[in-house]
Structure formats: structure tokens, C-alpha cells
């Protein structure tokens, strides 16, 4: 008998505790007509933000006002997107590969240019034919390697200044999103 009373009291306590807790519910309908509910606005897909219905909240304990205005403020202040819903971060990620390639290839080109200059100075001062041949081969090898880096630099500049910039304009993205 005592355990039965204890179970009933515990059940009533749980019901009362839940009914007086803070509650904010967001409701939206997707394209297929399915209705969804959540208590976390971050779980609402961005494309349904304009369809969200907010249910009135109960004030929290201590008389503090609820944060029902947070959701509408978040909707107003959401990050700008292009025509296809892609954000600035998507464009920056896309361009970052080319910025990294441009930076790496430029530093390698500068390194090789210095090595060619140093080898040229040694070649000018070399007196025996063996040393001259060795440094001519070294300079030729460095020049061939440098051509690869110049091609990478040209490719990265073309992608950043032409291809991605044109894609951003067509998509209605801000061109400044392509810069690091």
C-alpha cells in the first residue's frame, strides 16, 4: 500500500514539475506537408525559418521574462547568402584552396629564384669545367622546377581573379567573400 501511494505521489510530482517548467515550441511544415515540432530553434532548417510558428512561452521561475524574442531576432540577423543559399563561409572555403596554392607556389618561386642567383654567382667564379657543368645542370634543373611553380601561380590567380569571381557574380555573392 505504501509503495502504491509513493508511486502516485512521485507521478504527480513529475507531472507538476513538467507543467511548470519553461517551454518554447517551434512548429513548421516542410515541402511534403509534414509538421515538425522542436524546442530548439537551431534545429529548424534555415529554409523553413519563414514558416516557423512560435508558441507562447511560460515565464521562468523567479519571474524572469522568457526569451521568446530571440528566435525572431535570429531570423532578422541571419547571415547573408547568395541566390543558391550558400553563405560567405562556403565561398571562403572554396577560395581558400587557391589562396593556399598561390601563397605556397609564390614562396617556392622566390626560394628557387634565390637559389638560381646564388648558383649563377658560383658559376661566374668557377674556374674548372667540371664545376661549371655541375652548376649549369643545377640551374637548368631549378629553372624547370620553377616553371612548375609559375604554372601553379598562374592557375591560382586565374581561378581567384576570373573563374571564382565570375561564379560569385552569377550566384549573387559578394566578391569580397573570396578574399581570406
Image (tube, rainbow, N blue to C red):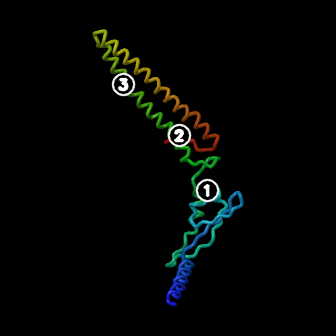
Count residues near mark 2 (Cα–Cα under 10 Å), then give few for <14, some for 14-19, many for 20+: many
Find residue 126 and name its label: none
Query: In this rendering, would 8 be left or right of 27?
Result: left
Residue marked by disc 2? 95
Sequence-earlier tag: 2 or 1? 1
Provide the secondary structure element on which disc 3 rests: helix
Sequence-earlier tag: 1 or 3? 1
Judged from this view, the residue extending furthest toward the front is 1
Report the front residue among 85 and 173: 85
> Looking at the picture, how far across and down is residue 180, in whole percent?
49, 42
Sequence-earlier tag: 2 or 3? 2
Provide the secondary structure element on which disc 2 rests: helix
> Looking at the picture, how far across and down is residue 48, in whole percent?
65, 58
Indicate whether 45 appears above or below 127.
below
Indicate whether 112 appears above or below 122.
below
Q: Quadrant of residue 18?
A: bottom right
> Looking at the picture, how far across and down is residue 27, in whole percent?
64, 66
Count residues near mark 3 (Cα–Cα under 10 Å), then give few for <14, some for 14-19, many for 20+: few
Tell me how far mark 2 sits from mark 3, CA to CA: 29 Å
Q: Nearer the viewer's eye, disc 1 or disc 3?
A: 1
Residue marked by disc 3? 114
Tell me how far mark 2 sits from mark 1, CA to CA: 24 Å
Question: Which residue shows up at 51% across the image and 75% down it?
Answer: 64
Question: Which residue shows up at 50% across the image and 26% down it?
Answer: 151
Residue marked by disc 1? 46
> Looking at the picture, how far across and down is residue 21, in whole percent?
54, 76
Amino acid at each position: 500500500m505504501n509503495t502504491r501511494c509513493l508511486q502516485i505521489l512521485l507521478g504527480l510530482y513529475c507531472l507538476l514539475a513538467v507543467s511548470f517548467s519553461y517551454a518554447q515550441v517551434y512548429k513548421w511544415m516542410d515541402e511534403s506537408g509534414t509538421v515538425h515540432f522542436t524546442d530548439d530553434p537551431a534545429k529548424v532548417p534555415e529554409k523553413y525559418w519563414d514558416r516557423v510558428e512560435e508558441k507562447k512561452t511560460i515565464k521562468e521561475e523567479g519571474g524572469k521574462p522568457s526569451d521568446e524574442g530571440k528566435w525572431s531576432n535570429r531570423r532578422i540577423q541571419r547571415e547573408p547568402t547568395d541566390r543558391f543559399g550558400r553563405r560567405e563561409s562556403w565561398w571562403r572555403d572554396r577560395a581558400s584552396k587557391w589562396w593556399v596554392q598561390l601563397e605556397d607556389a609564390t614562396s617556392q618561386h622566390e626560394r628557387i629564384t634565390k637559389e638560381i642567383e646564388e648558383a649563377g654567382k658560383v658559376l661566374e667564379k668557377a674556374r674548372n669545367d667540371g664545376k661549371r657543368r655541375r652548376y649549369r645542370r643545377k640551374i637548368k634543373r631549378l629553372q624547370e622546377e620553377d616553371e612548375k611553380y609559375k604554372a601553379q601561380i598562374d592557375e591560382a590567380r586565374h581561378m581567384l581573379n576570373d573563374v571564382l569571381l565570375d561564379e560569385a557574380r552569377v550566384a549573387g555573392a559578394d566578391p569580397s567573400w573570396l578574399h581570406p
